[in-house]
Amino acid sequence: MALLIGVPAEAIAGERRLSVVPDVVKKYLGLGAKVMIQTGAGVSAHLRDDMFAEVQFASSGVELCAAADAVLCVQPPSAELIAAMKPGAVLLGMLQPWSSAERVQQLMEKQISSFALELLPRISRSQSMDALSSQGAVAGYECALIAADHSPKFFPMLTYAAGTIRPAKVLVIGAGVAGLQAIATARRIGAMVEAYDVRPETREQIESLGAKFVDTGVSAAGTGGYARELTDEEKAKQAERLAKAVAQCDALITTAAIPGKKAPRIITADMVARMKPGAVVVDMAADSGGNVEGTIAGEKTWVNDVLLIGPTNIASRMPVHASEMYAKNLFNFISPFIKDGELVLDWEDEVVAGCCLTHAGELRHAGVKQVLGL
């Protein structure tokens, strides 16, 4: 029997992305699989039902999950949808594996083979499946636009009849995928951009985008492409050097986040107090505690005359391209294992084994097991 791939509507408030798009549906069908989508699931991503050819439609998420052999999601499904899934079914998406022991326990009890893209091994072969990177690029782009939209200054240099307006100065903290995209976008808009990252190897990437690297003399190069935690002494040295750059910028964008961990506090209230009147701060890490002291997730807060913005679920602000990118990530993960219309997972495969959260009633990921205490 052909593999039935199910795509439920996203139920989390504000989530506008979808885990499949029409072009990717064609690819699944070309592999011999079938696709079922919940009626109206793509409306918020501007994907009408009539745009999906040769798919089945389910009137509810429960109906869909009860029928599907593999369920694709953006946000973790509700307990109700997990309860409706067939034992042995596959669940693939951004499952926030560290956030809920109850959800992981339910996946184990239902014998669900779940794969969390946050756990994807950071190897060359997995780059095309890396949803953290694809959605991080969207978020970085959006953060630059949010900063420009809220700034009381022009980002680009402007010449008019009475003279010239100097371009705004933007400081980006963190030079991962999101940070680099924020740098590139702010530069395209015309701002002068400086950037900082605790990993010294990012200097070349920052400068290649036309930004100036802020050197604090602190290095925190870690494993897997992520930064390690700084010592108290290193944090103090970093703060001293950063404070000057922060005080001089018109817009500050912070992007430092580590999946599954609380965001590092980099910008203190004292630094914010020393910023220019009218300066704007966009804290991309607001969802995980924020890089900036005083940031409130999902809110805009004035601290003296500085605006702190804590946007959440940022990639969902641009659902058309974010959905397209995400759907391709999922397809690139699962498609090599669809053989003649059936799903045949290779448990010796480094990506499959490394990304697996639960299988056959067990929690398979050691790191998640340690965090959740299961």
Image (tube, rainbow, N blue to C red):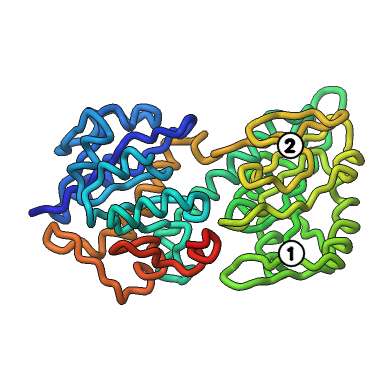
Residue reaching furthest top?
A: 161
Please state if 369 lies on the left or on the right of 7 as rendered: right
Label 2: few (<14), some or many (≥20) within 10 Å? some
The residue type indicated by label 2 comes to: Pro
The answer to whether any part of residue 188 appears in the image is no
For marks 2 and 1 on the same chain, the one whose residue lies earlier in the sequence: 2
Q: Which mark is residue 156?
A: 2
- Residue at x 80% of width, y 43% of height: 169
In the rendered image, residue 329, in percent from the top left (x then y), is placed at 38, 54
Residue behind mark 1 = 198
The answer to whether any part of residue 285 appears in the image is yes
In the rendered image, residue 215, in percent from the top left (x then y), is placed at 82, 63
Could you tell me which quadrant the N terminus lies in? bottom left
Q: Nearer the viewer, residue 131 or 185?
A: 131
Quadrant of the rendered structure where residue 115 is? bottom left
Number of marks present in the image shown: 2
Q: Nearer the viewer, residue 170 or 36?
A: 36
The residue type indicated by label 1 comes to: Val
Rendered view: 229 above or below 191: below
In the rendered image, residue 271, in percent from the top left (x then y), is placed at 88, 45
- Residue at x 25% of width, y 29% of height: 39
Please state if 290 lies on the left or on the right of 129 as rendered: right
Label 1: few (<14), some or many (≥20) within 10 Å? many
The alpha-carbon separation of the residues under discs 2 and 1 comes to 28 Å
Please state if 342 lies on the left or on the right of 303 as rendered: left
In the rendered image, residue 141, in percent from the top left (x then y), is placed at 59, 43
Secondary structure found at label 1: loop
